[in-house]
């Protein structure tokens, strides 16, 4: 039940049905960078990003099309792009649209 609207007509009160507000779509941008081959290479960042995408879609009801994954290595299913400056900006614009 949402908020109720109470209106008056000629001195008599009537209660309108509850308002049904639509929820905005849930979106996410997930970025995982291992920096493989560099002096500052990391391990597990890409795996963590893939795990979060799986968690959001399977546990929290996100539509797979509404989760953008940006990773710098590996072969992954779905909408995956390299985490370049341009792709990060494009993904954040998509996220806030």
Image (tube, helix red, strand yellow):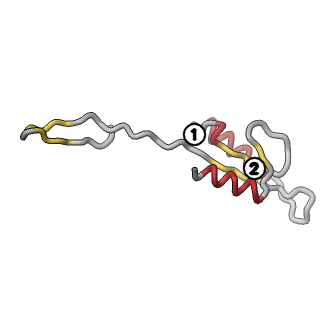
Identify the disc placed on residue 60: 1
The percent position of residue 16, horizontal first and vertical second, equals: 23, 36
Identify the disc placed on residue 11: none
Q: Earlier in the sequence, mark 1 or mark 2?
A: 1
The percent position of residue 30, horizontal first and vertical second, equals: 69, 50
The percent position of residue 83, horizontal first and vertical second, equals: 78, 54
Badge 2: how crowded within 10 Å, few (<14), some, or many (20+)? many
Q: Residue visible at 58% across and 53% down?
A: 96
State whether residue 97 is above or below residue 54.
below
Element under label 1? loop
Give the residue number, with chain letter if any, for mark 2.
70
Q: Nearer the viewer, mark 1 or mark 2?
A: 2
The percent position of residue 40, horizontal first and vertical second, equals: 86, 64
State whether residue 63 is above or below residue 86.
above
Q: Quadrant of residue 84?
A: bottom right
Residue found at the very far bottom of the displayed protein: 39
Q: Residue visible at 26% across and 41% down?
A: 4
Q: How many marks?
A: 2
- Whether residue 74 sits left or right of residue 61 in the image: it is right
Badge 1: how crowded within 10 Å, few (<14), some, or many (20+)? few
State whether residue 6 is above or below residue 32.
above
């Amino acid at each position: 039940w949402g908020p109720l609207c109470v209106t008056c007509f000629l001195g008599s009160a009537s209660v309108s049905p509850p308002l049904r507000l639509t929820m905005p779509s849930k979106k996410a941008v997930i970025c995982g960078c291992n920096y493989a081959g560099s002096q500052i290479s990391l391990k597990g960042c890409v795996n963590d990003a893939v795990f979060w995408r799986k968690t959001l879609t399977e546990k929290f009801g996100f539509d797979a099309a509404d989760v953008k994954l940006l990773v710098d290595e590996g072969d992954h299913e779905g909408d995956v792009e390299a985490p370049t400056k341009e792709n990060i900006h494009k993904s954040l614009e998509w996220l806030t649209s």
